[in-house]
Image: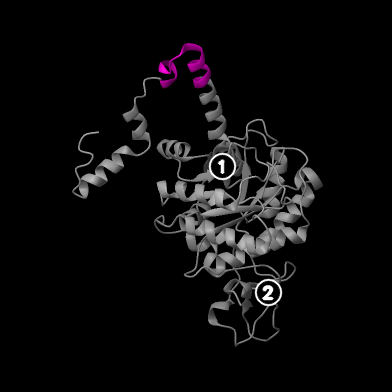
Amino acid sequence: MAPGLDYYRSPEPTQAPVVQVVAVDRSSTDTSSTDSEPSDRRLTPSPERPLKPGVYYNPRLDPKNFIDGPLSYDPATRLRQMLARPGIVVAPGICDGISARCALEAGFDCLYQSGAATTASRLGMPDLAIATLNDFVQSAQMVCGLSPTTPVIADADTGFGGTAMVARTVYQYARAGVAAMHIEDQVQTKRCGHLMGKQVVSREEFVTRIRAAVIARDSIPGGSNFVIIGRTDSAQVLGMDEAITRLKLAADAGADVCFIEGVKTSQLLTKTIEALKPKPVLVNVISGGLTPSFTCKEAEVLGAKIIIFSLVSCVAAVHGIRAAMQSLKKTGTDFTSAQGMDPKAFFEVMGLSDVVELDARAGGTAFEVV
């Protein structure tokens, strides 16, 4: 049996005064386990989230374990530390290596690999379930390699299939260096969360996806801190109450963070955050989309823990590249659009100095003059 499965076993009544990791019920905190249970399964309730039958709880991943100490070099652990400590996590959406470099240069300490942006940059296509797992993983490998300690939150759409594909997605993302992924409740022929006409799967299928992701994460040898984010797109289809219910179920199934897509007002965002406490809530801001253009500070005041700006880089790229192409077509030169940036200055943004320094420290002479 996969290691993660034992978090979902049924409780075994006993008089032993311990609480089983897996068996938990929202209505009662009085559950117990047999003396034969391994010691790492005999737990006391978490002050952050009392244990109840049917609710996943992994003591190793309790937020209290990530409050103190220096930030980890492992990006998933670092993200958990950021979530456990004060302040909102701000993750700009990146679409390629250039946008990732620009985000890092600006000083962002977390990045977001948007599914829409990845589909657009790699395939030149709209966000309509066209990109594959391989497209997403290849992009993630490149982005995570630019700054291996910086957490990258990656879109995983619907998990690209059934439970086996959801698990495979977790393994591939974790191996690529991704710190967190979000998985949603749209049907397989999904679309951008800010387009109309969305369809969602049943509550049960959504929870199955989340549970498969959690089991896969807990099956990674060595104890992975990979963060699972449950996302619902049901607010525009079935209403806010259903969306909140689905996120509660996702949290019970083991989602570390809850992501409500297309929340239309600050009042509804506040309602969601209050209903899901103490789970962190992620809000997605897209200019002109369904969600108000919250600033980072506004979202933090409302209680959101993560804010992502999915299309910030690719929309800016469209504006900038369009203007440059139109100028070139009209004037016959790229002098104006270059704005004085010569090739060396461009390569500096792409990490030229780091490569030159590495070569020199290794005793190479290939880049003595560049």
Is residue 307 shown above or below 25? Answer: above
Is residue 17 shown above or below 64? Answer: below
Residue at left offset 76%, top offset 48%: 234
The reply to whether residue 190 is in sight is yes
Q: Quadrant of residue 116?
A: top right
Image location of residue 300, percent across then percent down: 58, 42
Image location of residue 96, percent across then percent down: 49, 40
Is residue 66 shown left or right of residue 280? Answer: left
Give, as a three-letter code, the residue at label 2.
Ala
Q: Which quadrant, please, contains the C terminus?
A: top left
Closer to us: 62 or 190:
190
Is residue 303 shown above or below 126? Answer: below
Q: Which residue is mark 1?
A: 118
User: Which is in the foreground here, disc 1 or disc 2?
Assistant: 1
Main SS, magenta region, reads: helix
Is residue 292 shown left or right of residue 323? Answer: right
Closer to us: 62 or 168:
168
Q: Which mark is residue 283?
A: none
Q: Which quadrant, please, contains the N terminus?
A: bottom right
Is residue 15 shown left or right of residue 44? Answer: right
Q: Which residues are magenta?
A: 324-338
Question: Among all residues in the image, which is located at the extreme right?
Answer: 238
Is residue 93 magenta-colored? no
Q: Earlier in the sequence, mark 1 or mark 2?
A: 2
Numbered circles on residues, count: 2
Q: Which residue is mark 2?
A: 23
| Circle 2 residues within 10 Å: few <14, some 14–19, many ≥20 | many
